């Protein structure tokens, strides 16, 4: 069964749902705006902080993996699990020991993230356009900005790795937050 987005009942249901939850969109948008502004103002700090947080996550997950792997040493795949856990400990330790060097590797991951995020956000916006939920253009612009950010990071390597993560994540958060605030305000004014 197919849903016709131009059906007045469907449109009313979409508007009603968006209207009921506009505050959640607004809160998320404001939080993204604030965090994005902080990251833009102090990008090297944001870059190092992100690298250190990821280092601790890898280290912690690796240690947990090692412990559970040894408890289940007779289970199939023991050696693969052991290698995976040891790799997580190694990567976490390397990110914590040399966060600036780790920022380069994370910058490569960030390039990939912004590219995929841009494509997904554009598709999200186009879905909103099809459903006639309003202000989809802001989300579309956010996706285009993500694609531009991906290209900017790649072009600035390797020197931009120290500040790029913090600055570009901040810019992404500001645009994403702006898009969510615009959608929330539109949904607030829609008839529910």
Image (cartoon, helix red, strand yellow):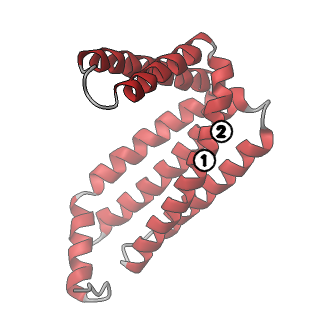
Residue 168 shows up from this direction:
no
Give the number of marks. 2
Would you say the residues marked 1 and 2 are in contact, meaning their CB atoms lie under 8 Å apart?
yes
Q: Nearer the viewer, residue 37 or 158?
A: 158
Q: Which residue does the numbered mark 2 point to in the structure image?
A: 108
Residue 79: percent from left, percent from top:
40, 24
Q: Which residue does the numbered mark 1 point to in the structure image?
A: 112
Looking at the image, is 137 positioned above or below residue 90?
below
Looking at the image, is 119 positioned above or below residue 93?
below
Q: Nearer the viewer, residue 102 or 76?
A: 76
Residue 1 shows up from this direction:
yes
Res. 42 image quadrant: top right
| SS under mark 2 | helix
Res. 61 image quadrant: top left
Looking at the image, is 86 positioned above or below residue 184?
above
- Is 148 displayed left or right of 184 in the figure? right
**Residue farthest top in this picture:** 97
* Quadrant of the snapshot with the N terminus: bottom left
Q: Residue at x 41, y 79 (%)?
A: 130
Residue 98: percent from left, percent from top:
64, 14
Q: Residue at x 78, y 32 (%)?
A: 158
| SS under mark 1 | helix
């Amino acid at each position: 069964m197919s849903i016709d987005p131009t059906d007045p009942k469907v449109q009313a249901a979409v508007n009603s749902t968006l209207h009921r939850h506009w505050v959640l969109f607004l809160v998320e948008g404001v939080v993204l705006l604030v965090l994005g502004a902080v990251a833009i103002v102090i990008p090297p700090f944001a870059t190092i902080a992100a690298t250190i947080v990821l280092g601790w996550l890898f280290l912690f997950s690796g240690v947990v993996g090692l412990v559970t792997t040894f408890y289940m040493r007779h289970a199939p795949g023991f050696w693969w699990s052991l290698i995976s856990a040891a790799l997580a400990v190694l990567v976490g330790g390397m990110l914590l020991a040399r966060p600036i060097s780790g920022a380069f590797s994370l910058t490569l991951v960030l390039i990939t993230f912004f590219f995929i995020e841009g494509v997904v956000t554009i598709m999200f916006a186009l879905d909103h356009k099809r459903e006639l939920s309003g202000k989809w253009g802001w989300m579309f612009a956010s996706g285009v900005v993500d694609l531009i950010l991906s290209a900017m990071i790649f072009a600035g390597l390797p020197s931009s790795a120290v500040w790029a993560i913090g600055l570009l994540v901040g810019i992404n958060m500001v645009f994403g937050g702006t898009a969510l605030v615009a959608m929330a305000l539109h949904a607030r004014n829609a008839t529910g």
